[in-house]
Amino acid sequence: MWDDAVPRPGWQQMAIDRALAERAARDGTCVFRLYRWERDTVSFGANESARRTWDRERLERLQVPCVRRPTGGRGVWHDAADLTYAVTAPLSEFGSLPVAYRVIHEQLARAIRRLGLKARLAPGSRRPTLAPGACFDIAVGGEVLVRDRKTIGSAQALIGGTLLQHGAIARADRSPALARFRLASALSDPDVSAADLPAADLVTNAVVTTWQAEGGVVAPGELAEWAVRESAAHQGRYQDPDWTWRR
């Protein structure tokens, strides 16, 4: 369990997660990382057609940072006051991607319930879509709902037998913030908005407490130092606008 309290730019967050995934592939290191963004940022899914969904000119004119995730899914507005988690582990630790998705979300739901909120998983099976839109427009099976509204949305990638699962923990409805940048041709009405959560520090404490209660241990400082150092090998890709807007 790595509670990464240092807010970082989106490109560095993605590079760190990629480095941790590669380490998991080499030596089996399993990490749950909880982090914040340096400033409000938009992330695109690995295979999302960002160019036909989001207004690049307006995003750049207003200096909103954008980054493309190594995981799938659709666009997400990462508010600086929100949290993101990443799990990196050999897929064999879970058995399959669907099982990993469910197990991780069940644990996060238990953490949210520590805050006195009624959290549950969305019914049905997971059917992600690449149709134009935002991650929080819809809730797919297995995502975390609070008061029947989507609060945690996640995406996965399999990197050489290693799981990387990202998830945005939205403390409030960020749909209006992201909708400002949707191209007219990609307009749609979201049917699920995010429920309000307490302050990020309280959410962090609930998540950390839950992970430790269920056997998680605090990551040594050496791991954080290693991850930041090794992420340098990936930072060029995630800083490159041509990579971010390649689709």
Image (tube, grey):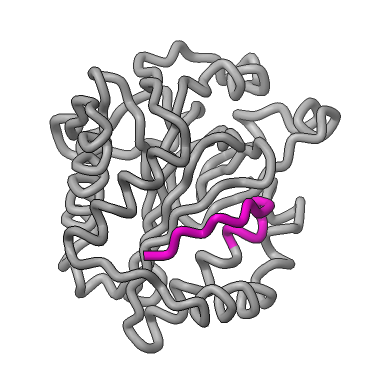
Q: Locate the C terminus and report the quarter of the image it occupies.
A: top right
Residue closer to the observer: 186 or 38: 38
Q: Is residue 75 above or below residue 246?
A: above
Q: Residue 103 at what x, y percent from top left? A: 18, 53
The quadrant holding residue 212 is bottom left
Percent coordinates x, y for residue 122 in the rendering: 20, 30
Where is residue 88 shown, x and y percent of the image? Answer: 38, 67
**Magenta stretch contains residue 13:** yes
User: Which residue does the image show at 32% across and 83% down from the upper left?
Assistant: 28
Vertical position of residue 72 compared to residue 193: above or below:
below
User: Horizontal placement of 91 versus 7: left or right?
Assistant: left
In the rendered image, the vertical position of residue 189 relative to residue 167, given as above or below: above
Q: Write the residue at 67% across / 46% down.
A: 38
Figure label count: 0
Residue in the picture at 69% in, 40% down: 39
Q: Quadrant of the N terminus?
A: bottom left
Residue at x-position 53% and y-position 73%: 224
- Image side of residue 95 versus residue 21, left or right: left
**Residue 210 picture location, percent across and down:** 24, 52
Q: Nearer the viewer, residue 66 or 229?
A: 229
Q: Is residue 14 above or below residue 218?
A: above
Q: Which residues are magenta?
A: 1-14
Which residue is situated farthest in the right direction here?
Answer: 61
Name the image quarter holding residue 225. Answer: bottom right
Query: Please, which residue is most extreme toward the top here?
Result: 189
Q: Is residue 107 magenta?
A: no
Nearer to me, 101 or 213 = 213
